[in-house]
Image: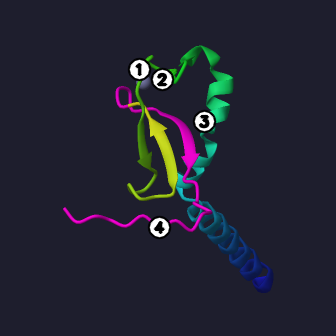
Amino acid sequence: MDHLMLFVIVAVFAIFYWVYYTGSRKGACTTSWEALPTRAQYLAAHPEAVDGDIIFCIHCGHHQQLEVGVVHQADYRRQHICPRCKQALYRDEEQEESGGETVGSRPG
Ligand SMILES: [Zn+2]
């Protein structure tokens, strides 16, 4: 009986640890970013929110979006948020330049 009890306790701890470990591995930022539609999906889902080159916020109708990184400004995971109601509208992955052209930074 003692061995069975010990096994049950260890199993319960293992399950708790596994749930906690796998749960904490997924960053909330990444999953929420991945849940966002892409720009094309956003436009396809909300054709009424587009007028030419202007994309409107589906939440408050604002006509501007702020492009920001998810964690920091240089994050490759870009998301466009509405500066007015602070809702994330769609995501954008930074495109990698396949060409070998380098842009030198000018001083000043
Ligand atoms: Zn808005």
Q: Nearer the viewer, mark 3 or mark 4?
A: 4
Magenta segment boundaries in residue numbering: 83-108
In this rendering, the answer to whether 70 lies above or below 22 is above
The nearer-to-camera label among 4 and 2 is 4
Q: Quadrant of the N terminus?
A: bottom right
Residue in the picture at 63% in, 39% down = 38
The mark that comes first in sequence, 1 or 2, is: 2
Residue depicted at x 45% and y 16%:
61
Crowd rating for badge 2 (residues with CA inside 10 Å; few <14, some 14–19, many 20+)? many
How far is the residue under mark 1 from the one under mark 4? 36 Å
Q: Which mark is residue 62?
A: 1
Numbered label attached to residue 39: 3
Mark 1 vs ligand 1: CB under 8 Å? yes
Q: Which residue is labeled 4 in the image?
A: 102
Work out how far the residue at label 3 is from the one at label 1, CA to CA, in angstroms: 16 Å
> Is residue 100 shown left or right of residue 87?
right
Query: Image quarter for residue 4?
Result: bottom right
Q: Residue at x 59, y 51 (%)?
A: 31
Q: Where is residue 29 drawn, in percent x and y?
A: 51, 52
Confirm if mark 2 falls within 8 A of ligand 1.
yes
Badge 3: few (under 14), some or many (20 or more) residues near its Cα, within 10 Å?
some
Q: Are marks 3 and 4 in contact (CB under 8 Å)?
A: no
Q: Kindly identify which numbered label has been placed on residue 57.
A: 2
Of labels 2 and 3, earlier in sequence is 3
Q: Is residue 105 magenta?
A: yes
Q: Looking at the image, is mark 4 or mark 2 earlier in the sequence?
A: 2
CB under 8 Å between discs 1 and 2: yes
Left or right? Give the position of 37 relative to 88. Answer: right
Q: Give the mark toward the camera: 2 or 3.
A: 3
Q: Earlier in the sequence, mark 1 or mark 4?
A: 1
